[in-house]
Amino acid sequence: MCGNYEQGHPGEIFRESCVLGKQLTIDSIDGRRKVCGESFFELRGEIDTEWVFADGSYVRAHQHASGARHGEERGIGRSAGGLTTKIHMAADAHGNPIDFEITGGEVHDAKVAEKVIEKIGSAVHFIADKGYDSESIREQVRLFGMNPVIPRKSNSRKANPEFDGFLYKLRHLVENLFARLKHFRSIATRFEKLARNFKAIVYLACSLIWIKFL
């Protein structure tokens, strides 16, 4: 077992507990134990929803990430880059993480868009790249009261009156978020065999990003 202390809410200290093969948990000084996802939502500050972003990024899976027990969810797939995992991230107007989904690297962004949009809930503008260019995604975005700022694919002849070029340029904020996440060695290269364990690592990294922002 290994552990490091991080400051959470004022007056509250969390201790990271990592046991190989088990889900990552957080112990608070008052004895409460939570999985990393629960702690993330408690540590997460106020979300700026003037505009929000959705995007996906690949993570190479190390050879030691293979060999999970049969029947366990792995979240590893084969793409052009070999064995990869994909993080589908939702970020707020400051480029801070809202929530995410983990899939195999072969899963297209559009297939996970519905879950990502549900995690966002509501905002003013929903900004994403051409991978989210479909009428079904746009309609779901509108159902949640958001304006879809999504460019059309190059071969599309449809009008796009909702597209705002200035807001779309802000999409670098979610790219910057992925860059910050990949400063963590365990996210830049995935070593965990199970999807739940890798997801806990990403939640922990997202929590640290929020702590620095607050």
Image (cartoon, grey):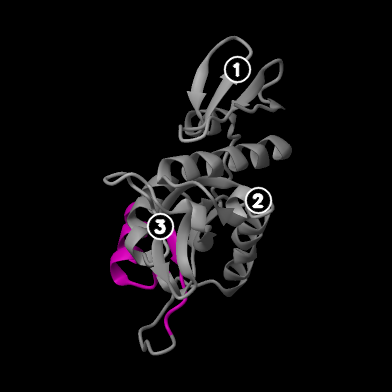
Q: Earlier in the sequence, mark 1 or mark 2?
A: 1
**Residue pictured at 33% horizontal, 47% vertical:** 73
Magenta stretch: give its range: 132-153
**Residue pictured at 49% horizontal, 46% vertical:** 192
Q: Circle 1 sits on which residue?
A: 28
Q: Amino acid at mark 1?
A: Ser
Tell me which corner region of the image, top left, top right, bottom left or bottom right, holds residue 11: top right
Mark 3 Cα shell of 10 Å, populated few (<14), some (14-19), many (≥20): many
Q: Earlier in the sequence, mark 2 or mark 3?
A: 3
- Residue 124 visible within the image: no
Q: Position of residue 190 (x, y in %)?
A: 54, 53
Q: Label for residue 185?
A: 2
Q: Circle 3 sits on which residue?
A: 76
Foreground pick, 94 / 22: 22
Could you tell whether 202 is left or right of 177 in the image? left
- Figure check: 108 above or below 54: below
Secondary structure beneath dot 1 equals strand
